[in-house]
């Protein structure tokens, strides 16, 4: 079942624990903010890990993001999430004595508009910091990530609904020199009376591992603050 995922991550990228799934959902659209405009957003996500034999919850995330339009074609965004691991992986022989209570995720996200309003490239550079309780001994651990992502969006003519699909490669690096790549995808939508001002963004995601995947769902709320003319 999902134990195979733990073993794969543990052996292939020296990942000290698979008690949480890496951040995948973006709650984004391809359109840039444009010069001088600001984005404020918040989100909730639920992640599960598994395969053919079934899925178990791994973590629930709460987070927020701040974005600024540096130019009409380039945004710079900053993201924080609190990852709260669940008990989904407890009871396996590999991780019986290991516990992670919470994970702090920090991300810097350059975003480049490739085709205005339709296609963009995001390059999140991220850091996970957490403490592990292993056999009663607490140790600090970190995981870093570079995750280039292509995002395509189609928008309704009245600018009240959009649909986005994203594809990413999440390159993970541990503090002891381990590394690995996970491939992922997201499918999201935006609903609003005016998408240039605010949006509610439900989203589904999957991050693939040999023999299984981390799947996720959640919802984000996005507000755009336009610069004064």
Image (cartoon, rainbow, N blue to C red):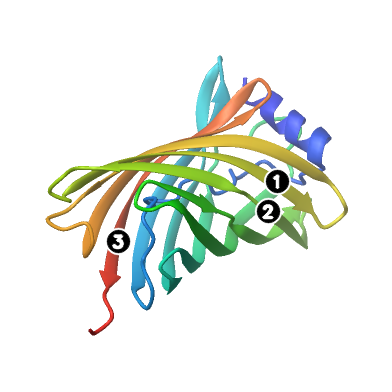
Residue that label 1 marks? 171
Callout 1: SS:
strand
Residue found at x 72% / y 55%: 143
Residue in the foreground of this view, choosing between 210 and 98: 210
> Real-space Cα distance between discs 2 and 1?
5 Å
The answer to whether residue 89 is visible is: no
Q: How many marks?
A: 3
The residue at the far front in this view is 115
Query: What's the residue at 50%, 61% (across, down)?
Result: 81
Give how far apart the Cα atoms at labels 3 and 1 are: 27 Å
Residue contact between numbered discs 2 and 1, judged by CB atoms under 8 Å: yes
CB under 8 Å between discs 2 and 3:
no
Q: Residues within 10 Å of mark 1 (few under 14, many from 20)?
A: some
Q: Position of residue 123 (x, y in %)?
A: 59, 55
Residue at disc 2, secondary structure:
strand
Of 20 and 162, which appears nearest the observer? 162
Residue at image mark 3: 222
Q: CA distance from mark 2 to mark 3?
A: 24 Å
Q: Residue 53 versus residue 45: which sits nearer the camera?
A: 45
Q: Which residue is mark 2?
A: 145
Say above or below: 66 vs 131.
below
| Image coords of residue 80 (percent x, y) | 51, 65
């Amino acid at each position: 079942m999902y134990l195979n995922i733990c073993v794969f991550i543990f052996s292939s990228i020296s990942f000290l624990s698979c008690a949480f799934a890496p951040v995948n959902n973006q709650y984004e659209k391809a359109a840039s903010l444009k010069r001088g405009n600001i984005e404020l957003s918040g989100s909730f996500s639920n992640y599960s890990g598994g395969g053919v034999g079934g899925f178990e919850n791994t973590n629930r995330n709460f987070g927020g993001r701040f974005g600024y339009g540096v130019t009409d074609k380039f945004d710079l965004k900053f993201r924080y999430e609190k990852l709260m691991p669940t008990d989904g992986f407890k009871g396996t022989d590999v991780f019986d004595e290991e516990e992670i209570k919470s994970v702090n995720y920090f991300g810097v996200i350059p975003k480049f508009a490739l085709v205005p309003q339709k296609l963009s490239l995001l390059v999140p550079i991220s850091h996970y910091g957490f403490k592990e309780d292993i056999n009663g001994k607490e140790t600090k651990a970190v995981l870093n990530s570079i995750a280039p992502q292509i995002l395509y969006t189609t928008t309704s003519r009245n600018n009240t609904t959009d649909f986005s699909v994203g594809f990413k490669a999440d390159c993970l690096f541990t503090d002891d020199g381990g590394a690995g790549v996970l491939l992922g995808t997201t499918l999201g939508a935006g609903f609003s009376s005016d998408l240039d001002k605010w949006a509610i963004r439900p989203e589904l995601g999957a991050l693939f591992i040999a023999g299984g995947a981390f799947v996720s769902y959640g919802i984000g709320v996005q507000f755009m603050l336009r610069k004064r003319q």
